[in-house]
Image: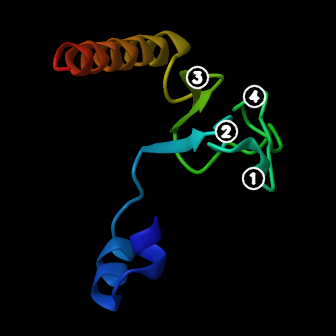
Amino acid sequence: GALRTFGPPEVRERLGRAAHGQVVFNYLGQWDARPENPGDGLVRAEHGSFGRHHDPRDSGSHPLEIVGAVQRGRLSFTWHHRPALHTTDTVRRVAEDFAQALRHIAHHARDRR
């Protein structure tokens, strides 16, 4: 999306002709991170939910939207899909495979220490 809008002219032209992807992945970061010195920060906010915060009649920009963030030290993802295109069971299976892959990466990283 960023290259489609802000990239060099030749990239914008090529991407403008291409179809949009079917999946959007948005990692929001660590929302509850605390500064090393608590008095140094100007803003401290925590979000309670990473669900949709817009009109539920809006089907979104992609058939599958994955939103992730770290909150209270825990990485979590919310999956949004269009049931007319993908069944909930199918999306659930893909999400479970995704979670298993993340667990594998985390175990591998832990074992390499």
When the figure is inspected, residue 1 is found, relative to residue 65, above or below; the finding is below
Residue at 45% of width from left, 80% of height from top?
A: 6
When the figure is inspected, residue 108 is found, relative to residue 56, above or below; the finding is above
Q: Which residue is mark 3?
A: 73
Give the crowd class for mark 1: few <14, some 14-19, many >=20 residues within 10 Å. Answer: few
Count of residue discs: 4
Residue type, mark 1 in image: Gly
Q: Which residue is mark 1?
A: 41
Q: Which residue is mark 2?
A: 34
Residue at 53% of width from left, 46% of height from top?
A: 62
Residue type, mark 2 in image: Arg
Mark 1 or 2 closer to N-term?
2
Residue 42 percent location from the top left of the image: 80, 56
The disc label shown at residue 49, or none: 4
Give the crowd class for mark 4: few <14, some 14-19, many >=20 residues within 10 Å. Answer: few
Q: Give the Cα separation between the discs numbered 1 and 2.
A: 8 Å
* Label pair 1/3, CB-CB below 8 angstroms: no
